[in-house]
Image (cartoon, rainbow, N blue to C red):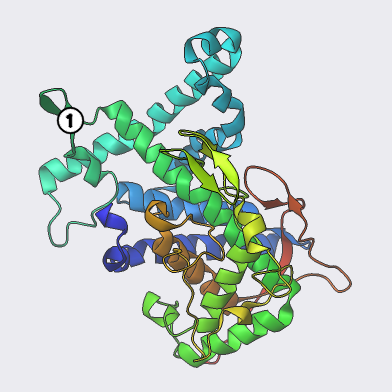
Amino acid sequence: MIFIHAFRHKLYSDGRKWAYDVLKKKLIAAEAESEKDILVQDHFQHAVFCLLAYMCFGDKLKETIIREIEAVQRPILTNFIRFNVLNFMPRLGKIVFRKRWKELLEIRRNQEDVLLPLIRARQEKIKHKGLGENQGIVCYVDTLFDLQLPKENSERKFSEGEIVSLCSEYINGGTDTSTTTLQWVMANLVKHQDIQEKLVREINRVVKRGEDIIKEEDLIKMPYLKAIVLETLRRHPPGHFILPRAVTEDTVLDGYDIPTNAMVNFTVADMAWDPNVWEDPMEFRPERFYGDNGEVEFDLKGVKEIKMMPFGAGRRVCPAISLAILHQQYFVANLVRDFKWEVEDGEDVDLSEKQDFTMIMKNPLRTRISPRIKDS
């Protein structure tokens, strides 16, 4: 997973800028066409798909292709729980739930129809042009072509079907969580105008006048921005649970006996709302992440202590944690710098949550946006 290592983040800056430009143009068009509040969820989701497709396949794909990727990937996300039943007694499940199995096979065929041409095109590009200087970035699918898998006494490469599955997993793994978190960040900035304006002042102190877009190196100088993203992950983690774990030997945890191979779930949302750990945990207060030295320092990976774990913790923490934080900061900073986010007078933002596989709003964010006046 070297391509998502922190020292490679800069390599994908062009893709981030492209994805944000796509989002910005769509927001401007939506604002111009509508006299009502804009439903931003679909626009956020499309921009994240653009970015992850760029990082997966190494190209700025046409909107029609991005839409095709979205169309074949969304059914997997939205039917995750329904299809999970097929994992139990697979042979019997194919008979008992044959309609569901047929539906899953159809989704898989659609995925291959859309993703395989992109995979093959990338493979041909590498074969004829290589990946040297000025030949483009090293993307996720590039790292899969030459991997060797052990097979008895010999080794083999991934099959095309396996590469399709891995690319699908990569895109889905970052899309829903990133879109959900971004929507929660912006919802809280709409609800708490004072926090939004404080962030605007920080951005204006850091970014030079006339700069077209906020760059990655600018984000390091914005501690309040980082605190806002961390507070969003604490107050509104994108999932109630992380992926389940299993113990390898009989264990006693807090007085409970956990037998070998027993599945264990961690309620990450409740952990982050614990009043014994957090003061007024249900309040949205980014300042809680400031240390005594005025810097934002927090052990998000759970190396020294665990106070919240939206990405998991320890050795099994999400490997893309730093990349996910960067993407949130990048989109939020540029969105707030370019637009003022608010609702109609007398209205409010509903921050109640739907208890689902991902923690989403019962009523997706609708907001009015207006371009901020920039100094010439």
- Residue 290 position, x and y percent, is 55, 84
**Residue 373 visible in the picture:** no
Q: Secondary structure at mark 1?
A: strand
**Residue 286 visible in the picture:** yes
| Residue 37 picture quarter | bottom right
Q: Nearer the viewer, residue 248 or 251?
A: 251
- Residue 270 position, x and y percent, is 67, 56
Q: Nearer the viewer, residue 358 or 309?
A: 309
Counting labels gives 1
- Residue 233 position, x and y percent, is 58, 63
Instruction: Describe residue 373's horizontal placement relative to residue 325 as left or right.
Output: right
Q: Which residue is mark 1?
A: 150
| Residue 268 picture quarter | bottom right
Does residue 34 lie above or below 207 as drawn?
above
Q: Residues within 10 Å of mark 1 (few under 14, many from 20)?
A: few
Residue under the image location 29 percent in, 48 percent down: 140
Does residue 153 lie above or below 262 as drawn?
above
Instruction: Describe residue 118's horizontal placement relative to residue 301 as left or right.
Output: left
- Residue 39 position, x and y percent, is 70, 56
Q: Amino acid at mark 1?
A: Pro
Name the outermost residue toward the right: 346
| Residue 338 picture quarter | bottom right
